[in-house]
Image (cartoon, helix red, strand yellow):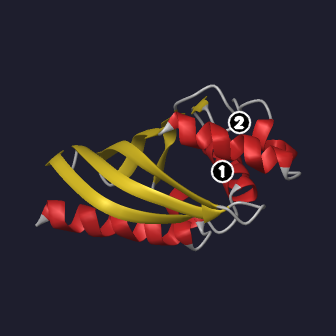
C-alpha cells in the first residue's frame, strides 16, 4: 500500500511540473536536498538548497516553456525512512522555432519520511544539448548560460 501511495505522489508531482507548478513539487523537498542534473550545460547542476533548486526549475521553464512530463514507469523500493523511487519519463516541448522536442529522462529519488532528500536526473545529453543550442539560436540566451550553483 505504501508503494502505491508513493507512486501516486510522484505522478502528481509530474502533473504539477507539466502545469508549471514547481512550487508544489518543492514543498516535498527536504531542506538538506541534494539535487543533481547531469551534464555540462545550462541545466547541469549539483545543488544543495531549495532556493537554488527553485532557480533551476524557473530556468528550465524559461528555456522550455510548456514542458510536459509523461510517466513511462515508476519503481518504488524501501520503507518510509529510506525509500528509493526510479522514474522513467518522456519529456516533450515545442522549441521556439516550432520544432518538437522529445527526450527520455531517468530520475532517481530518495525519500525520507515523505521528503525528497536526493534527486538525481539524467536525460539523453545529445538531444538535450541540441535543443539547448536551438533555443539559444532562437534568442533564449539562458539556454547556454553557466550552470546554476549554490
Lower position in the chain sequence, tag 2 or tag 1: 2
Residue 27, image x and y in percent?
51, 60
Indicate left or right for 47 with 123 as reference.
right
Q: Which residue is drawn at 48% across and 39% down?
A: 124
Q: Which residue is drawn at 25% across and 61% down?
A: 6
Check the picture and name the quadrant holding the N terminus.
bottom left
Q: Which residue is drawn at 42% across and 58% down?
A: 90
Sort mark 2 into few (<14), some (14-19) or many (20+) by Cα contacts within 10 Å.
many
Is residue 126 visible in the rendered structure shown here? yes
Tell me the SS state at disc 1.
Answer: helix
Residue 92, image x and y in percent?
54, 62
Residue 49, image x and y in percent?
61, 38
Give the alpha-carbon distance from disc 2 to disc 1, as whole Å: 15 Å
Tell me the SS state at disc 2.
Answer: loop
Residue at far top of view: 40
The residue pinned by badge 1 equals 54
Q: In this view, does 128 lie above or below 58?
A: above
Q: Quadrant of residue 62?
A: bottom right
**Nearer the camera: disc 2 or disc 1:** 2
The residue pinned by badge 2 equals 42
Residue 88 circle label? none
Residue 36, image x and y in percent?
51, 33
Check the picture and name the quadrant holding the C terminus.
top right
Indicate left or right for 138 with 124 as reference.
right
Sort mark 1 into few (<14), some (14-19) or many (20+) by Cα contacts within 10 Å.
some
Amino acid at each position: 500500500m505504501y508503494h502505491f501511495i508513493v507512486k501516486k505522489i510522484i505522478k502528481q508531482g509530474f502533473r504539477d511540473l507539466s502545469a508549471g507548478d514547481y512550487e508544489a513539487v518543492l514543498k516535498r523537498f527536504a531542506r538538506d536536498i541534494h539535487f543533481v542534473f547531469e551534464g555540462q550545460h545550462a541545466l547541469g547542476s549539483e545543488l544543495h538548497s531549495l532556493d537554488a533548486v527553485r532557480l533551476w526549475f524557473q530556468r528550465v521553464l524559461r528555456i522550455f516553456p510548456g514542458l510536459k512530463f509523461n510517466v513511462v514507469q515508476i519503481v518504488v523500493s524501501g520503507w518510509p525512512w529510506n525509500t528509493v523511487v526510479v522514474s522513467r519519463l518522456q519529456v516533450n516541448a515545442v522549441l521556439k522555432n516550432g520544432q518538437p522536442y522529445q527526450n527520455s529522462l531517468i530520475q532517481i529519488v530518495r525519500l525520507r519520511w515523505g521528503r525528497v532528500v536526493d534527486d538525481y536526473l539524467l536525460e539523453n545529453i545529445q538531444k538535450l544539448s541540441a535543443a539547448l543550442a536551438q533555443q539559444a539560436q532562437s534568442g533564449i540566451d539562458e539556454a547556454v548560460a553557466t550552470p546554476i550553483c549554490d
